[in-house]
Image: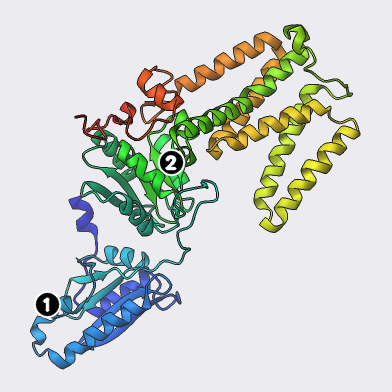
Amino acid sequence: MPEMIQKQIPISDSLKKNEQYMKDRVGLGVSFDLGVRKIHVLKKELNIYYVNGLCDTRFIIAILTELMRANDFEKQTSKLYEIVENRLVNQSLKPIQYMDELTDQVLSGLIVVLMEGETTGFVIDVRSYPGRQPQEPDTEKVIRGSRDGFIENIIINTALTRRRIRDERLRFEILKIGERSKTDVAIGYLKDVANPDLVDILKKELESIEIDGVPMADKAIEEFLVRQGINPYPLVRYTERADIAATHLLEGHVIIYVDTSPSVIITPTTFFHHLQHAEEYRQSPTVGTFIRWVRFIGTLASLFLLPLWLLVVLEPSLLPKKIAFIGPNKTTHIPVIIQMFLADFGNLILRMAAIHTPTALSTAMGLIAAVLIGQIAIDVGLFVPEVILYISIATIGTYSTPSYELGIANTLARLMLLIFVSVFHTIGFIVGVTLFLLFLVSIHSLNTPYLWPFFPFNPHAFLHVAFRRSVLSSKLRPSIVHPLDRYRQPTN
């Protein structure tokens, strides 16, 4: 670190040299949005550097007005540094001494004040990033609950979290990632709750990232943290809801905030974290448990319903006589397995088309796809009706999965199980399910077993997964995050 500081270019006491540096290095005078305002205070020149569009003009005008008033009330020009520092009416003021830091701060939306004859400048935070106001996320809606959600501004996102946790031990450590993008990334945690080893690991991983920029924000950061490879299953959880992020902070998780992203990264997480939804905690424990079980059934149906149905189609003798009617009552020239793959891929294409279709047209497109395409495919003999039925049930189960990433991963797992069943029949189903479970067991996210508390089995934690417990009965934090303080509430 000392060697790096020595290589940095210090701020010159000559404003012309500093201005020439900004012209050569940053493009002052070429880029229309980068500017410098020159004023004279007590017969000495001051330069204020800024970027239009990232600063609040009202604050800059107020600062300029206050600085110019010094000409009417101040007489001691030898104390220009102290006078300017006192006149900069802003709660966020920081001295800097290097040009690299100056360019980073200006390009981040702050303004920098340089004074003639001084080798120290002042950084003032007057940022006003363009963006939308906090609103309810489209992918995590609830019937009852808060309607504010994270947006693309890291300052507002941390403020939404701090509004819910007004604890002096809540920490937000910020750093910049990307040699060119210099994206702000913050690590949020409760100092007396979160595992310090996990915090240190995440900080070291983030600090070791060497890349030009992270325009894809949190997703790019995730790939550096967990190094997922070809594993389709999500190893971190995303949320756009501030209440969910605050809940996980109180449990001992560590949250990663990335500027320009409306979602935050929750670490560490397991398979069952991706099956939770805020709606369960906005209802009574009994209703919340019922909703959770329905969601579990939908997820299981999205995984195993189609392979099971294909198995009984290929081997009808496996069915008891009372339910022997299950199976295609009609036949076509296309094998059932091909029909299922075509229908499944068709559903995925329709889903992608709905995402990229304007809202005013997506509903009409969905009705056309559901009513016309499916019925016509049956009438012309392309599909048997049962294929459409079971594909629809499996697709609804995928949609009921709260995590979009988990739903897509389950779809890939289902297609693999269909291949195993179509080739090896009963043995294929057994081997396929076994390999699938072993694969999930082998996954670790930041040294956290992916199937915890199912494997390794933890009875107390498993009951919390299976049943929505009341707040009064949830006295212990999840042991999987290794919290420093295990108790949510006093035990006496």
Alpha carbon separation for disc pair 2 and 1: 45 Å
Toward the viewer: 184 or 451?
451
Give residue 19's quadrant in the image: bottom left
Give coordinates of residue 215: x percent, y percent. 47, 53
Of the pair 101 and 68, the residue shown nearer to us: 68
> Which of the colour schemes (rainbow, by chain, secondary structure, one colour) is used?
rainbow
Near-viewer residue (69 or 181): 69
Question: On the picture, is 125 further left or further right than 27?
Answer: left
- From this view, report whether residue 209 is shown above or below residue 413: below
- Residue 127 vertical position relative to residue 297 in the rendered view, above or below: below
Residue 400 - label: none
Count residues near mark 2 (Cα–Cα under 10 Å), then give few for <14, some for 14-19, many for 20+. some
Asked whether, in this view, residue 37 is left or right of residue 89, the answer is right
Q: Which residue is drawn at 34% across and 72% down?
A: 22
Residue at 46% of width from left, 29% of height from top? 272
Residue 230 visible at all: no
Q: Is residue 212 visible?
A: yes
Neighbours of disc 1 within 10 Å: few (<14), some (14-19), many (20+): few
* Nearer the observer, 51 or 276: 276
Type of the residue with mark 1: Glu
Q: In which quarter of the image is residue 55?
A: bottom left
Three-letter amino acid code of the residue under disc 2: Glu
- The residue beneath circle 1 is 82
| Residue at the spot of label 2 | 222
Quarter of the picture containing the C terminus is top left
Q: Earlier in the sequence, mark 2 or mark 1?
A: 1
Give SS at disc 1: helix
